[in-house]
Image (tube, rainbow, N blue to C red):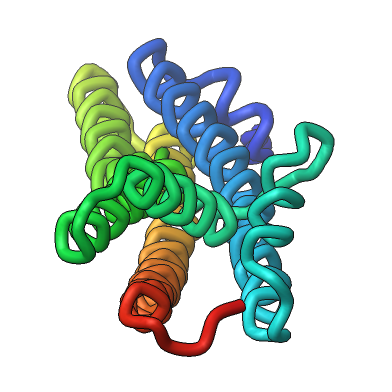
Amino acid sequence: MAVDLSITHLILDASLVVQLVMLILLAASVSSWAVIFRKIRQLKAARHGAERFEDEFWSGGNLSELYARSEHPDLHTGGLERIFRAGFREFNRMRQQGAAAEPTMESAQRVMRVALNREMDQLEQQVPYLATVGSTSPYIGLFGTVWGIMNSFLALGAMQQATLATVAPGIAEALIATALGLFAAIPAVMAYNRFSNQSERIAGRYEMFIEEFTSFLQRHLQGGPSR
């Protein structure tokens, strides 16, 4: 008698525990792909926004006008622009209060650091979830495999005559759990490494801008070239 070893048949005939493991891995895979697509769009927007704002900032235009445009409610601003806006707003506030140069610069830089941390929190949000999926999915799949093989051998021990046809379906359904675990883990790990690297690059870019903008504001306070 031929044994149906199609993937669909093996999943439907799997034990309840193995089916539950497969369902968990499928949900982990779908959710991780949703995170991956969302982070791709978010990081791409952050890079393009930083490039656009840096070009505009270093084009030699007036900073007050640039700040006014960044405050426009209908304008979609990027992370670097929000950092600039926070720093320039604090700088102007301290100047209006007649604060000395050193407290003014410390306050502006502190505000920009807070804005930087806020932006990085947004960029890194849900990225650790990919690491969790990547590290746990193979073990969840392995649990389903061990459970399925254990059930197969228990059923085999109760048979008078064992054949490969009686053992193969149980082992095959168990190995599907391992395959699903790897299917969920591999993209998640690759995406986690890529997103972590991209976030570090963006953070470095933001850090460099803060240092450059701080130096520019210091020169402005010391009576240097103004824009």
> In which quadrant of the rendered image does the C terminus lie?
bottom right
Residue 190 found in image quarter = bottom left
Q: Nearer the viewer, residue 72 or 14?
A: 72
Residue 171 x/y as whole percent: 38, 41
Residue 91 x/y as whole percent: 39, 54
At 26% across and 24% down in the image, what residue appears?
151
At 51% across and 41% down in the image, what residue appears?
32
Work out whether residue 208 can be spotted.
yes
Name, please, the residue furthest toward the right: 74
Residue 160 found in image quarter = top left
Work out whether residue 184 can be spotted.
no
Q: Is residue 10 left or right of residue 61?
A: left
Residue 89 x/y as whole percent: 47, 46
At 45% across and 63% down in the image, what residue appears?
195
Name, please, the residue furthest toward the top: 16
> In which quadrant of the rendered image does the N terminus lie?
top right
At 64% across and 75% down in the image, what residue appears?
57
Q: Is residue 132 left or right of residue 23?
A: left
Q: Nearer the viewer, residue 47 or 151?
A: 47
The mark total stands at 0
Give the vertical position of 173 relative to 87 (above or below).
Answer: above
Q: Nearer the viewer, residue 182 or 100?
A: 100
Give the vertical position of 96 relative to 44 (above or below).
Answer: above
Q: Nearer the viewer, residue 171 or 177?
A: 177
Residue 126 x/y as whole percent: 41, 39
